[in-house]
Amino acid sequence: MVSTAPSKHRWHHLVGVSLIVLTAPALVAGCGQTPVASTSHSVGTKTAVLGLSGIKMILSYQPSPPVSLKTFHTKVNLVASGGKPIANAHVTMHLKMLEMDMPIQNVRLKSDGRGQYSGHSIFFMAGPWQMTTDVTVNGKTMKESLTVHVGN
């Protein structure tokens, strides 16, 4: 009697070929690609007291970490030492690429009239960037800087 069932050797060969055929597209799809930064809506924050003024600055930005060529939103809340919001400040953010000689981007943040200032920009490439926030109140300018690492 002749068996029509595949031999043990042939069965292992079919299983091996099937696994390669089923997994190859997933393997090829990931080849040569760099990891993409998270698309979550996480928010980065930094809190600082500006010099001797006692003004508390709360900087928040989204997304965190920033992603190159995507809109980057930032907000600055300013509160006097007594807890009252500062609504009459001029707030400008300067974005400087640290590893390349690129022009500094200057972003003037707009006031909502209640101590919150907001604006947006785009980081043109991945890498470390210095974000310097200038806050001018009653003719006196104070600065605060931080470094953010912009992803792809």
Image (cartoon, helix red, strand yellow):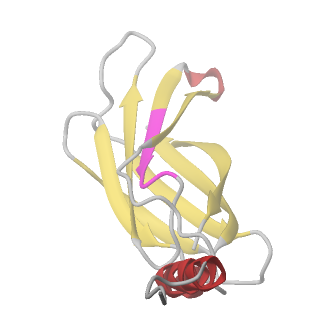
What residue appears at the point 53 percent right and 63 percent down from the top-left corner? 37
Residue 50, horizontal then vertical, whole percent: 59, 30
Task: Pick the residue in front: 140 or 104.
Answer: 104
What residue is at 49 percent from the left and 24 percent from the top? 55
- Viewer-proximal residue among 74 and 33: 33
Quadrant in which residue 94 is drawn? bottom right
Position of 142 relative to 35 (above/below): above
Image position, residue 26 (x, y; %) = 51, 79
Furthest toward the left, the residue is 113
Q: Residue at x 38, y 53 (%)?
A: 40
Q: Which residue reaches farthest top? A: 82
Does residue 60 belong to the magenta stretch?
yes
Query: As drawn, is 26 to the left or to the right of 127?
Result: left
Q: State the residue at coordinates (54%, 54%).
A: 65
Q: Is residue 10 left or right of residue 121?
A: right
Most frequent secondary structure within the magenta stretch: strand
Q: Which residues are magenta?
A: 58-64
Q: Quadrant of residue 39?
A: bottom left
Residue 40 magenta-highlighted? no
**Which residue occupies the extreme right position in the image?**
99
The C terminus: image quadrant: bottom right
**Pick the front one: 121 or 104:** 121
Q: Would you say residue 126 is visible in this rendering?
A: yes
Is residue 139 visible in the rendered structure shown here? no
